[in-house]
Image (tube, rainbow, N blue to C red):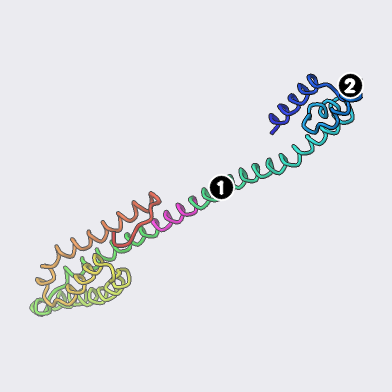
Amino acid sequence: MLRIVVLFLAACWTTSAQAESCKTILDAARRLECYDDAFKVDHLLADVLNSPQAVVAILAAVFAFISGVGGPLVTLWIGRKQAAASQTSANAAMLTAKTAGFREIAKLRISWMDNLRDTLAEYHAILMNLEDKDVLEAVSDVDERKSRQKSNDEGLKKIVLLGTQLDLLLNKEDAIQRKLWDITDEIYNRERSTERQALDAPLMDAGRAVLKGEWEKVKQEMRSAEFQPGK
């Protein structure tokens, strides 16, 4: 904008230097012809630029124009810069909050895994050590039989509690967790210790599969990458 104004003023001063002012023409006919010829703009420019008041008025008008047009443009440019900076700041804040959320979820998932591991380990240990009724009845020593029977009864009560905890911890809608739940339930319903012990390996494999799947979710959440269910 300023460059255009400067070029315009330079052109005006060049024209005024080359043009013949109508006022300086002594011949009346030529002077009249000068004023009557509307296409001889150079003469008009010469008259205007030879007047200090006119030059001052023109410059004032030019600078007023620059101020009137340039001011809002500068304000608009600054506003856009500020809006862009605000958007960048908002995006950064949103990313920080999202990352913090993922990490909190990961911490909760790790706590859930620890709880599941401890519950499953205790459930497994008790089930694998329960004795059959006929085995207990065959113990000849009365005190030993009573002691082992008491331990067995306490184990059965504990199994009910642990089974309920596993039922609440596991998501039956998840295929991997459903498999673990089915095996724990099947072991619980087996009457013979040999039958329960036969399911020991499948139980451990199902437990490891659940913990591994959850650990993969934790790693993705710690990297702030949203985990997509089913993938």
Q: Assign the magenta stretch its main secondary structure.
A: helix
Q: Quadrant of the C terminus?
A: bottom left
Q: Which residue is mark 2?
A: 25
Q: Amino acid at mark 1?
A: Ser
Residue lying at 38% horizontally and 52% vertically, measured from the top left: 225
For this rendering, which residue is in front, 10 or 192?
A: 10
Residue lying at 13% horizontally and 71% vertically, measured from the top left: 196
161 to 68, vertically: above or below: below
Q: Do the CB atoms of the residues marked 1 and 2 lie less than 8 Å apart? A: no
Is residue 105 on the magenta stretch? Answer: yes
Residue lying at 23% horizontally and 62% vertically, measured from the top left: 207
User: What is the x, y in percent for residue 100?
Assistant: 46, 53
Q: Residue furthest front?
A: 29
Q: Which residue is mark 1?
A: 89
Q: Which residues are magenta?
A: 96-107
Residue lying at 35% horizontally and 62% vertically, measured from the top left: 112
User: What is the x, y in percent for residue 54?
Assistant: 87, 31
Horizontal side of residue 142 vs 97, given as left or right: left
Question: What secondary structure is marked by label 2?
Answer: loop
Q: Residues within 10 Å of mark 1 (few under 14, many from 20)?
A: few
